[in-house]
Each structure stands twice: as structure tokens, then as C-alpha cells.
């Protein structure tokens, strides 16, 4: 689905930013005027222009807050958070030593944190015990009644941030009466930037402490816990559900059986080019970003290490250990995990359902970016049935 750019990666990320308008994370006009100032493939301009829009919108929020306009302040700060995240997206050449990347990430976190405190039921920032440290999270409550409700444990994937989790899932869950405990696991968001934690294939070691924490929270119905993972999180959530059986339902958004596909595709294309992988990264935005982000989030020093690092990320021999009802989602035109949802679905032996989001209904992009309302409608309608709501 081409959106504003011919470059596949720029098109997708612009659509991703714009799609969060469903829950107040963007304004279409702001997206359009920002993108028209960004030439094709110009990552520096991408960062500069999105950062400028974010700063302008943040000022709107701060003026509104100072004047006592709570709703206006919340709306502007939510948009600013998404725009700061978008501005930082391609800054992956050396993020550990990139002061501007760190500034943008902090600004996204800060503006969201201030907006979250202005929600009708303010969100609560939490730290979840994990090994010898903690993981950052937000507890979003449908209301402050204390009523025990079904609760979604949610994490993203290869490049998600905790703040983005609100637009990607939590806002839709809250409207339907679910509590949400969203968190960044190792390799995600601030855990890699601030704590030096990297992805690990045995994601049950991450989710089990989160379940322990969730069960100690007021208002959480222990019998109605759902686990949802997005993008690479489709593998991570499946892996966790194979071992953590306190989960009553699992949603793979979208399904992933094994994770080497995008990296194998890059290697295959690079092998046909004079100059190999270096040449491909120089000319292809998506390949360049995938490799650079992988080096950072997996804690690697060279692109050649990616293949071996990703090998353990597979559900082979594990899928039949998932016992809870599982919803597997698929995007018709997924550019990263083509065929993977069907593969994991076929390997499951638990109660299961498969939904394909088609291009002609607007949901064919990876993780249904641009079709957030449709994704939430189908996902939560299914969860309602499974959890007896």
C-alpha cells in the first residue's frame, strides 16, 4: 500500500505514524505537511522534520496545560510522543552514541508520560521485577472502580516502544473494558538504550515475571489473562505461551513460526549484488534499517552475526505446547513474515482461529498498520468470546 512515498520503508513508517490517529496519536494534516518536506530516502530530513513537528505540537500541549485545558494538553502530548518516536526511527547507525537519538527517545517517553497522567483514568507507570533488574511498564485501567476485569499483557516487537503500545493496543482495549499491562522486554525501547538488555529467544523467562506481577495487581482477573505480541512479538508471545500456562488466551499479531525470514531475504539479495551486503545497505532503506536495528537490539558487533543470533528464534518442536486458545493474524501483503502465520497456525494443536487482513479492506500491510480499528474490532471480539465477556 503506497502511502506518500515510493520507498517501501518510508511509506510504511509514514502509514504507521498516521494510523495512530485512530486513538489521538496523529493528525492527518500534520503528517502530510511533515512528509512533504522529506525527500525520498533522506533519513536525515526524516529525523529533522518529524522532530520539528513533534516540538511544535509539544508546545501546543504545554500551552494548553499551563492554561488548564486538560483534554487539549493530553491530545497534543500524545501526538508529540508518536512524532518524536517517528523522528528517532531511522537513527540506528550508532544509537548508543547518538545524542540526538537519545534526546528524541526521552522526549517521546516524557510527553507520553505527561499525557498518560491526563487520561480519564490516569495510567500508572510501573517497574516489573525481572532477574536482577526491572522492566518498564504501564498499567492502563479501564476505570478506577476496582472491579476485577480481563487483563491484556501486551508487548511489541523488533522496534516497538512502551509509549507506542498505547496507540497500538491499549487504547482499544480500554474502550472495551479491559485492563492492560504493557511493558518493554529486553531489546525493546528503553531496556536496550538505558539498561543494555538485548533480545532473548526464551521469552517465557520475560513473560512469567510479568504474569507474576500482574496477578498481584488490584482489579486483575487471574482467570482472564490474555497475552498479545506484535510483529516479532508474534514469535515472542507464542514462545512464552508454550511455557506459561496461566495465560487464558493468546493473540499472535501477526503469527511468526521462525524469525530468520527477513534476514535470509536480505542475504539472498545481497549475494546477487557487486559489493554484497554493504552495497545493499547503502541503497536500500529497509535492509539498512533492519540490520542496524538488529545489531543494536541483539547486542551484536557485525552484520555477519545476525544469522546465527536469530537461529534460536523458532517455534519448531514447541508450538504444540501451547494449550490456551490462540488467535493467529495474517496480513495479506506482509513484507517481513510472508507465510509465517499459516505455518505457526498449522503447527498449533490448541483451540485456534486464523484471520487474514486483506489489502482490499485496508489491512494488508504488516501488522495492519493503517487499519488499527479493524485489527482491534476483530481481536477484541474474539477475546470477548474466549474470555466469556
Image: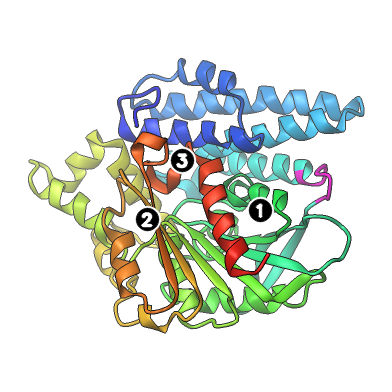
The image position of residue 74, as x and y in percent, is 78, 35
- Magenta highlight on residue 119: yes
Separation of residues labelled 3 and 2 (CA atoms): 21 Å
Separation of residues labelled 3 and 1 (CA atoms): 17 Å
The image position of residue 199, as x and y in percent, is 45, 66
Single out the mark in the foreground, 3 or 2.
3
The tag earlier along the polypeptide, 1 or 2, is 1
Q: Where does the N terminus fall, quadrant-wise?
A: top left
Query: Where 323 sits versus 146, above or below?
Result: below
176 sits left or right of 96 in the view: right
Q: Residue 139 sits in which quadrant?
A: bottom right
Residue visible at 32% across and 46% down? 332
Q: Which mark is residue 173?
A: 1
- Magenta highlight on residue 90: no
Q: Is residue 199 visible?
A: no
Residue visible at 35% across and 63% down? 256
The tag earlier along the polypeptide, 3 or 1, is 1
Residue visible at 57% across and 18% down? 29
The image position of residue 36, as x and y in percent, is 45, 15
Q: Which residue is denoted by mark 3 in the rendering?
A: 369
Q: Where does the C terminus fall, quadrant-wise?
A: bottom right
Check disc 2 and report its element: helix, strand or loop.
Answer: helix
Q: Which residue is denoted by mark 2 in the rendering?
A: 294
Closer to the camera in the image, 370 or 49: 370
Query: Where 1 sits versus 56, above or below?
Result: below
Separation of residues labelled 1 and 2 (CA atoms): 30 Å
Closer to the camera in the image, 257 or 259: 257
167 sits left or right of 116 in the view: left
The stretch of residues the image draws in magenta is: 116-122
Check disc 3 and report its element: helix, strand or loop.
Answer: loop
- The overriding secondary structure of the stretch rendered in magenta is loop
Amino acid at each position: 500500500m503506497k502511502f506518500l512515498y515510493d520507498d517501501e520503508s518510508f511509506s510504511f513508517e509514514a502509514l504507521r505514524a498516521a494510523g495512530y490517529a485512530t486513538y489521538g496519536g496523529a493528525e492527518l494534516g500534520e503528517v502530510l505537511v511533515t512528509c512533504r518536506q522529506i525527500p525520498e530516502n533522506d533519513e536525515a530530513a526524516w529525523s529533522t522534520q518529524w522532530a520539528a513537528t513533534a516540538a511544535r505540537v509539544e508546545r501546543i500541549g504545554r500551552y494548553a496545560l499551563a492554561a488548564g485545558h486538560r483534554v487539549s494538553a493530553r491530545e497534543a502530548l500524545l501526538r508529540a510522543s508518536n512524532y518524536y518516536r517517528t523522528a528517532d526511527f531511522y537513527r540506528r547507525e550508532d544509537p548508543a552514541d547518538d545524542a540526538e537519538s537519545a534526546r528524541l527517545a526521552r522526549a517521546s517517553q516524557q510527553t507520553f508520560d505527561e499525557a498518560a497522567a491526563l487520561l480519564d483514568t490516569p495510567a500508572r507507570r510501573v517497574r516489573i521485577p525481572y532477574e536482577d533488574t526491572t522492566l518498564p511498564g504501564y498499567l492502563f485501567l479501564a476505570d478506577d472502580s476496582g472491579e476485577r476485569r480481563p487483563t491484556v499483557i501486551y508487548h511489541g516487537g523488533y522496534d516497538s516502544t512502551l509509549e507506542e503500545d498505547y496507540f497500538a493496543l491499549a487504547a482499544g482495549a480500554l474502550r472495551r473494558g479491559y485492563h492492560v499491562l504493557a511493558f518493554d522486554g529486553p531489546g525493546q525501547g528503553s531496556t536496550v538504550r538505558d539498561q543494555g538488555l538485548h533480545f532473548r529467544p526464551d521469552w517465557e523467562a520475560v513473560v512469567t515475571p510479568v504474569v507474576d506481577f500482574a496477578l498481584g495487581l488490584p482489579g486483575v482477573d487471574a482467570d482472564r489473562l490474555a497475552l498479545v505480541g506484535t510483529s516479532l512479538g508474534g514469535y515472542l508471545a507464542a514462545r512464552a505461551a508454550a511455557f506459561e500456562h496461566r495465560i487464558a488466551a493468546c493473540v499472535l499479531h501477526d503469527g511468526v513460526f521462525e524469525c530468520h525470514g527477513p534476514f535470509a531475504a536480505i542475504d539472498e539479495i545481497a549475494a546477487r549484488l557487486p559489493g554484497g551486503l554493504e552495497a545493499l545497505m547503502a541503497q536500500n532503506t529497509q535492509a539498512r534499517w533492519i540490520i542496524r536495528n538488529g545489531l543494536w537490539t541483539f547486542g551484536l558487533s557485525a552484520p555477519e552475526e545476525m544469522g546465527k543470533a536469530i537461529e534460536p528464534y523458532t517455534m519448531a518442536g514447541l508450538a504444540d505446547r501451547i494449550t490456551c486458545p490462540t488467535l493467529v493474524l495474517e496480513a495479506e501483503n506482509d513484507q517481513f513474515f510472508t507465510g509465517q502465520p499459516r505455518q505457526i497456525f498449522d503447527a498449533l494443536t490448541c483451540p485456534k482461529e486464523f484471520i487474514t487482513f486483506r489489502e482490499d479492506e485496508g489491512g494488508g500491510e504488516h501488522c495492519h498498520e493503517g487499519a488499527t480499528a479493524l485489527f482491534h474490532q476483530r481481536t477484541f471480539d474474539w477475546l470477548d468470546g474466549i474470555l466469556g465477556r
